[in-house]
Amino acid sequence: MKYVSTRGAAPDLNFEEAMLTGLARDGGLYVPESWPQMSTDEIAALAGLSYEEVAFRVMRPFIGDTFTDAEFRDIIARAYASFGHAARVPLSQLDPNLFLMELHHGPTLAFKDVAMQLIGQMFQVALARRGQRVTIVGATSGDTGSAAIEAFRGLDAVDVFILFPDGRVSDVQRRQMTTPSEANVHALAVKGDFDDCQARLKDMFNDFAFRDAVGLAGVNSINWARVLAQVVYYFTAAVSLGAPHRKVSFTVPTGNFGDIFAGYVAKRMGLPIDRLVIATNRNDILHRTLETGRYQTEGVTPSISPSMDIQVSSNFERLLFDLYDREGAAVDQLMSDLKNGGSFALSQGAVDRLREEFDSGRADEDETRATITRVRQTTGQIVCPHTAVGIKVAADRRGDPSVPMVVLATAHAAKFPDAVEAATGLRPALPPRMADLFDRPERVTQVDNDLAALQATIREGRRA
């Protein structure tokens, strides 16, 4: 399996190279040269298997000879050993044919753990074999950062620097990033929003002298391995609800498009997905793009679902590559238009394909709060505001009522206690293992939204 850049001007890489490289040198994102296929019989055979075994079977075609079967099984086993539920990503039911896929049973209580714990183990094996050190730099709107720090803390071959928007993450999210004491992890509070953090991260990758000097690697969803790990739970959920003998739909609360793109990959592999529904909060650029055919950035407005407060959805570029028949030059032009003018217009053919594959909707702040309240009253469950956005949009875009609809529950309610308490009158408690989170000392570095300042901070913080 080879990996190609969405902009068509970078060398093809194998899985290990693509994983350790992150962003392609032409500024693009790596994707497989083709989508592996799973037959109806192969999908049916996943029924009743452990999450780990399904992960092995779904991901194995993508990794080539990077790991032996024994190595890969061991990596997967270690990745999910710390999850707090035997099913890893269990389903719960809200309504007739409406389900939640609980993605918050990992060590930092968010869906990012599903991919990040796996990446941490894969990096460790690959770097040890190479005798190589890397500097991981990531940008986060709240959950990626803590998941990355948890996955890489204490590892000898890795230094980790996480950029997060100062004052725009929840207190729990911030403390999960700033309280680990290991010397190889660093939380950098950037004066700006998530899009600023993400832009500076891409600037660092495009500064090849800096990139090579520090051994820069990325674990944001620009890294293909992140998306690949998320493909697995679409299979486990769908098979549990009757696939491949019946279709299943998914609604995904998303800002950066990576989580729902994983569903698109599952569908390309042969999973019978009926509808993929994009759920956005009031920062609704993805919803507006489906409605208008134009991707137009606007200012980011803080919300009670802060992990979705994004205007530049990096993984949308991966979809564009397919919408434009894998013409890298066309994608490169669109990304240039976005960088220089803050927008681009899709061709009519691309718009038609986009609407064939995806539906979308949005939930404002009042609708999100009302959904948290209603779910508590009707089911007894307490959901986080991001999950509530998904539930609200799923209700608006259900389609055929005979087709199961799965909403991705992306975070534990305790990560956003203020919003949940305002909606329900109940303050969700952290799990016992995190009960002392607010007693732990914080380590955080304040940094201006400036490339040179960030690069200096990273150079100084790396271990020799």
Image (tube, rainbow, N blue to C red):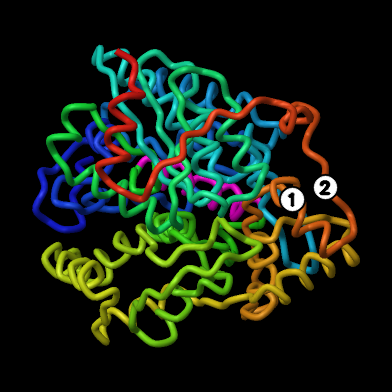
Instruction: Name the residue beneath numbered marker 2.
Output: 428
Which of pointers 2 and 1 lies earlier in the amino acid sequence?
1
Q: Amino acid at mark 1?
A: Ala
Report whether 87 appears left or right of 63.
Answer: right
Q: Amino acid at mark 2?
A: Pro
Quadrant location of residue 433? top right
Q: Where is residue 31 shown, x and y percent of the image?
A: 27, 50
Report whether 185 appears left or right of 315.
Answer: right
In magenta stretch: residue 458: no
* Secondary structure beneath label 2: loop
**Magenta stretch: dominant SS?**
helix
Q: Is residue 42 visible?
A: no
Q: Where is residue 65 shown, x and y percent of the image?
A: 26, 27
Q: Residue at x 37, y 64 (%)?
A: 312
Stretch in magenta: 225-240
Quadrant location of residue 314? bottom left
> From what the image shows, is residue 366 above or below residue 182?
below
Quarter that holds the C terminus: top left
Instruction: Name the residue beneath numbered marker 1.
Output: 413
Q: Is residue 188 visible?
A: yes
> From what the image shows, is residue 235 above or below residue 284?
above
